[in-house]
């Protein structure tokens, strides 16, 4: 997953605004679905973020072309822990562990098999 | 309606990113409802933007404290045209005419009387 | 220029938040530079939005894959008027005319020849 | 620090988009400065986020009126750790520890005394 940094992503400090790295990672998670012709958002079923822990290693700036790598760390029946790293070329800029839970009708629910395979086969 | 400009609103050019003025104006429109204990979003009923025309007069910057003035320009049964201006003290920064249509179950629909009064009495 | 609609682009109404169409168009303008190995942001020199006029024809939703077409409408020495349209397949969703002015050290300035060619040759 | 949830803050899942809680917390940090007539952004001097760890306890929705509480957890010469919690009435929605470092001319630098007092006296 590759992402360009546009004006909207930056702030007056000249770098990418800190919460936008989370957005980039969310795009990468969604794109795992889209690339297989699936959607991360089914009627009344989708993942929500439960917790995250992030390190800001180096800043990204306007015009950067970033790469996002997503690795599965832990699988439970109703949640996943992913590690997501953002690179500019070979330089690590951002490193996050994120736990997402699967909700169906607003309740924690077993992750469907076709979705689980998206992540485990990655 | 008064709004502070935070980091998230700016870009690397050092000023407020152009589309965020539209967000500020949307907050002001929503706040007209909230101030009266109403919500702009009822089950399957809400306004959508149909068109807008905006002039960027002077830029707002980080830390600015802005005021947004909203005036009703035109009323039709299923739509409104509003003029919204953003000021820093007495200086006009942004001037927009915006047409919003009322949707009910995704179809243009007559604006309920209690909502219409919010705008006409303003 | 093609853009995917992610969660961050949508709102609780289930469609793309109205100001995000402006962001999509800005990405397309920036990408005209990036595709040629140039940047829209040079030290103390860049375009700013002066005015715009937009029609919201149909809504885009989560997961849509959009195409943005940018056409030059008018050229002056220090400003451009562009027409930008957003499509989902062959369906027009959004249509905007936008005037951008070139600033150098915060003053209106003649658009450099290499930048002008980016748009006139498009 | 109190914040209203507007359309721009939500996504198609009907709740506040996960990274926007970070934005709300950043507004609260900036407002600590503004309330005292100071700015968090001085010429070439400002805080940047180094790391954060966040729990999403319950979702906020459109129209919510949220309160953000900021507590100093740890002080070093060039960095601070803050705990920030977001509440709707007495219900905890979001809980984050965030480490921010003070930069001067892009290098870690001792936090000025007047800024340190803003946090220690809070």
Image (cartoon, coloured by chain):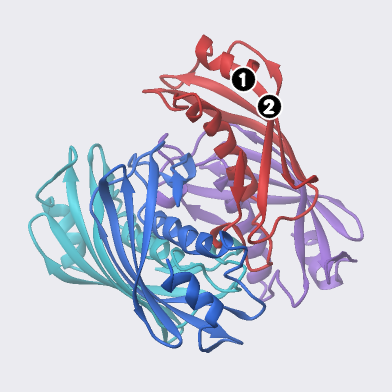
Chain colours: A purple, B blue, C cyan, D red
Q: Secondary structure at mark 1?
A: helix
**Who is closer to the viewer here, D76 or C39?**
D76
Mark 2 falls within which chain? D
Relative to C19, is B73 on the left or the right?
left
Is C75 situated above or below D87? below
Q: Secondary structure at mark 2?
A: strand
Q: Nearer the viewer, mark 2 or mark 1?
A: 1
Q: Who comes first in sequence, dot 2 or dot 1?
A: 2
Q: Is residue A64 above or below residue C21?
A: above
Q: Position of residue A121 (x, y in %)?
A: 78, 62
Mark 1 nearby-residue class (10 Å; few <14, some 14–19, many ≥20): some
Point out residue A97 in the picture as x, y percentages from the top left corner: 74, 43
- Same subunit, tags 2 and 1: yes
Check disc 2 and report the residue beneath it: D82
Above or below — where is D114 with respect to B44? above
Relative image position of residue B75 (x, y in whole percent)? 38, 81
Label 2: few (<14), some (14–19) or many (≥20) C-alpha neighbours in 10 Å: many
C86 vs C12, left or right, is: left
- Identify whether B119 is placed above or below B66: below
Residue C44, horizontal then vertical, whole percent: 23, 38
- Label 1 marks a residue whose chain is D
Residue at the location (75% across, 55% down)?
A: D59
Is residue A16 visible to the viewer in this orientation of the structure? Answer: no
Q: Which mark is residue D119?
A: 1
Q: Which residue is pictured at 58% across the width and 66% down the height?
A: C11
Q: Is residue A42 visible?
A: yes
Disc 2 to disc 1: CB gap under 8 Å? yes
Q: Quadrant of the C terminus of chain B?
A: bottom left
> How far apart are labels 2 and 1 at the CA level?
9 Å
Q: Residue at x 67, y 78 (%)?
A: B43
**Foreground residue among D122 and C40:** D122
């Amino acid at each position: 997953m590759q992402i360009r940094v546009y004006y909207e992503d930056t702030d007056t400090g000249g770098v990418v605004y800190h919460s936008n790295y989370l957005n980039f990672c969310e795009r990468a998670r969604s794109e795992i679905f889209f690339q297989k012709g699936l959607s991360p958002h089914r009627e009344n079923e989708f993942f929500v973020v439960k917790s995250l822990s992030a390190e800001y290693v180096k800043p990204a700036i306007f015009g950067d072309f970033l790469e996002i790598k997503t690795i599965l760390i832990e699988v439970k029946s109703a949640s996943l822990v992913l590690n997501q790293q953002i690179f500019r070329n070979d330089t690590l800029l951002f490193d996050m562990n994120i736990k997402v839970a699967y909700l169906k009708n607003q309740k924690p629910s077993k992750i469907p098999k076709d979705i689980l395979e998206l992540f485990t086969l990655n």
